[in-house]
Every structure is written in C-alpha cells, then in structure tokens.
Amino acid sequence: MNSTELVGYAASALVVASLAMTSVVRLRAISLVGSVIFVVYGALLPSVPIVVTNLAIAALNIWFLARELGGGRDLGAVVVPADSPFLADFLRHHDRDIRDFQPDFDASRPADVSIVLMRDGLPAGVVRGDMAGDTLHLTLDYVLRAYRDSRLGHWLFGRGSTVLRSRGIAVVESAGTTDAHRAYLTRMGFGTDDGKRYTREL
C-alpha cells in the first residue's frame, strides 16, 4: 500500500464515519474534511472526476454548515398545555434519549410551564419547569440529537428569551444531573456556586 492509497482510505473512512453521526453539524463537518482529503487523493492519482466531484461536495458541506451555524435557521418556541397529547407523545417517543441526558426526569409529573422548541417549523425539543416567584426551575431541557449542535439553546436563553420573560420569568435554574448536562448548562451561560444548582438571569 503506497501513500496515495492511504490518503484514499483515510478519506473513505471519514465519509463513512460522517454517515454514522446523529448530529447534523458533526455529519457536515466530518464529511467536509473527508471530501477535502478526497480532493487531495484525486489530485495525487490524478483523477479529474474525483477532484471535481469532491470539490462540489465540499462546497455543499460549507454552505450547509454556514446555514446551520450562521443564524439563518428559523427558531421558535410554542407554549403548550402540560397535558397536551402531542407533548405526551413526544416525551414518550424520546424517553430513552431524555433519560440518557436527564435521568431524573419524570414525564408523569405535572409542570407549570411546558414549551416546545421549534426549528424550521418542526418540533426539535422540549423545555419544562416549575415556577417559584420569578424563577423557573427546569425539570427538562431537551433537544433532539440531530440539533444539539445548533443554536436552539443559545437562542432560547438569548434572543428568544422573550417567550420566557413574557411569562414573568427573570431567572432560570437547573440541576446538573449528568456531566453532559452540566457541560451544556455551562455553555448556555449558567453559573453555579455549588456544582449542583445552575442559574441564569434573562
């Protein structure tokens, strides 16, 4: 096996790995790297069809990544009744994934506030919590795997926080139940004094 073949195998491995990604952003990013390496591989052969095809794939990946990360997505939030049949079905369908992220969540427990997060007109996550004065204690802050690298969380606690403030919410509080959850809360700008309760002012 010569060095040119190694480049080709590396590019192939990255393209295959990208197809295993559940995150849209990771899929596009890994596919982009794979297509760039395929361009190098095509140039080493040399093979014009391989170079042209993968330049086109790289350009498409860059375009989709820019669209995904550049704020062009239509993000929204809809307040729904806690006993909404749609909400119950959504939570039941994604129960296993929710428990991986927030194992203490109990879907049968009533909530003062239930919000469905929207992305391009489609449901992408759910936020639930209980009110204590002007503080919302989150019992669930969940986004589908495919969109966890998008800007839904930043939007909700940033520009989109009007949906929370309009309900009299000034502070959001959450318990960091897993390492992944704690890392997410930190990225969203939540602070903590004891490592157990994370808070963010809106």
Image: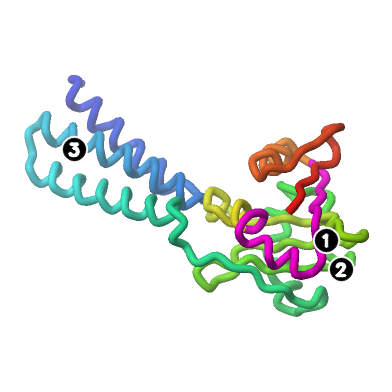
Q: CA distance from mark 3 to mark 1?
A: 49 Å
Q: Residue at (17%, 49%) from the top-left corner?
A: 53
Q: Mark 1 or mark 2: name the one nearer the start of the chain.
A: 2
Quarter of the N terminus within the rendering: top left
Question: Residue at horizontal 68%, vertical 42%?
Answer: 189
Quarter holding residue 133: bottom right
Give SS at disc 2: loop
- Amino acid under label 2? Asp
The quarter of the picture where residue 18 lies is top left
Q: Nearer the viewer, residue 96 or 106?
A: 106
Q: Nearer the viewer, residue 120 or 34?
A: 120
Q: Position of residue 159 (x, y in %)?
A: 60, 59
Judging by the rendered image, the residue that carries numbered circle 2 is 112
65 part of magenta stretch: no
Viewer-nearest of discs 2 and 3: 2
Q: Amino acid at mark 3?
A: Val
Question: Callout 3: helix, strand or loop?
Answer: helix
Amino acid on which the number 1 mark rests in the picture? Gly
Of marks 2 and 3, which one's residue comes earlier in the chain? Answer: 3
Residue position for label 3: 39
Pair 3/1: label in front: 1
Look at the picture and state if 116 lies above or below 4.
Answer: below
Q: In what quadrant of the picture does the C terminus appear? A: bottom right
Check whether the beta carbons of the residues at disc 2 and disc 3 lie within 8 A of each other: no
- Please tell me whether residue 162 belongs to the stretch shown in magenta: yes
Q: Is residue 144 visible?
A: no
In the displayed structure, does residue 132 sit left or right of residue 156?
right
Q: Do the residues under discs 1 and 2 have CB atoms within 8 angstroms?
A: yes
User: For residue 5, which numbered disc appears in the image?
Assistant: none
Q: Which mark is residue 129?
A: 1
